[in-house]
Image: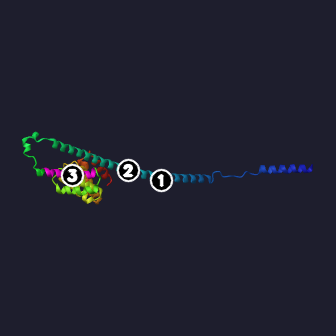
């Protein structure tokens, strides 16, 4: 009985001591706020870096899209020029057929007196054949390297031909594609100077500007492109010239 009473007394004293002991003090603010700020700063820095990487990737993709768009526009422009030349060839063929079918009896006497001599007819026939041969090497056979000496020979043999401005243009284009900037520039300049009414003048001026830029003559190139924009404002050549000017 005494042991039981003693145990109860000791238990009561232990409980009182537990109740009387002060609770441990914990600083719920010290350190935790700094940790949160540090964590937020880390997350913010990580997110910022990710955004910068994404922006760089977007910039690269945009540049690639711009380059592709420019290449497509140039290809469309070149295709348009090829189709234009084909239409010109069809018109030339129609005119020749019409001339062949015209009977001398239907020609006025004043014209009969000016009919070409056999030598002139032969020369004209050779001229047409030489020009058609050179053009067909481009449009039909796609033998561009072989077309170069054909156009050079044509210009040498028929300097006064009605096809001469077009021959200068085609030869200039062939040399341009081979990056013979000096040679191409000579042909484009000849067309511009000697045949100001040529339908190829706008494109020849644009291309001459490109050859000048490739030869580090930026001032001359700028002058030529501005000339294209001023003289042919609604042409495809003017649009390409404007893009070139923006890139200077």
Mark 1, other Cα within 10 Å: few <14 / some 14–19 / many ≥20: few
Q: Is residue 55 magenta?
A: no
Instruction: Tell whether 115 sits left or right of 13.
Output: left
Furthest residue toward right? 1
Foreground residue among 118 and 189: 118
Residue at label 1? 53
Q: Residues within 10 Å of mark 2 (few under 14, many from 20)?
A: few
Position in image of residue 4 (x %, y %): 90, 49
Q: Which residue is mark 3?
A: 131
Identified at 12% across, 41% down, the residue is: 103
Position of residue 72 in the picture relative to residue 33 (left or right): left
Sequence order check, earlier mark of 1 and 3: 1
Instruction: Find the distance from the CA under tag 1 to the CA under tag 3.
Output: 57 Å
Q: Earlier in the sequence, mark 2 or mark 1?
A: 1
Q: Quadrant where the C terminus lies?
A: bottom left
- What number is the disc on residue 68? 2
Prevailing secondary structure of the magenta residues: helix
Boundaries of the magenta span: 121-139
């Amino acid at each position: 009985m005494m042991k039981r009473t003693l145990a109860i007394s000791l238990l009561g004293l232990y409980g009182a001591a537990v109740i009387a002991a002060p609770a441990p003090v914990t600083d719920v603010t010290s350190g935790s706020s700094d940790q949160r700020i540090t964590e937020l700063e880390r997350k913010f820095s990580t997110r910022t870096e990710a955004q910068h990487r994404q922006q760089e990737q977007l910039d690269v993709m945009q540049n690639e899209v711009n380059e592709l768009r420019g290449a497509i526009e140039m290809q469309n422009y070149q295709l348009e020029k090829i189709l234009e030349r084909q239409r010109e060839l069809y018109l030339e063929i129609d005119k020749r057929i019409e001339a062949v079918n015209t009977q001398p009896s239907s020609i006025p006497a004043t014209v009969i007196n000016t009919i070409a001599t056999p030598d002139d007819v032969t020369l004209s026939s050779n001229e047409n054949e030489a020009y058609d041969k050179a053009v067909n090497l481009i449009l039909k056979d796609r033998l561009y390297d072989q077309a170069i000496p054909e156009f050079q020979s044509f210009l040498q043999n028929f300097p006064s031909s009605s096809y001469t401005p077009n021959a200068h243009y085609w030869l200039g284009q062939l040399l341009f594609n081979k990056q013979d900037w000096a040679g191409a520039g000579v042909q484009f300049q000849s067309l511009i100077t000697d045949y100001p009414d040529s339908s190829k003048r706008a494109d020849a001026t644009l291309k001459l500007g490109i050859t000048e830029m490739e030869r580090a003559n930026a001032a001359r190139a700028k002058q030529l492109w501005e000339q294209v924009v001023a003289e042919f404002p609604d042409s495809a050549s003017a649009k390409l010239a404007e893009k070139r000017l923006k890139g200077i």
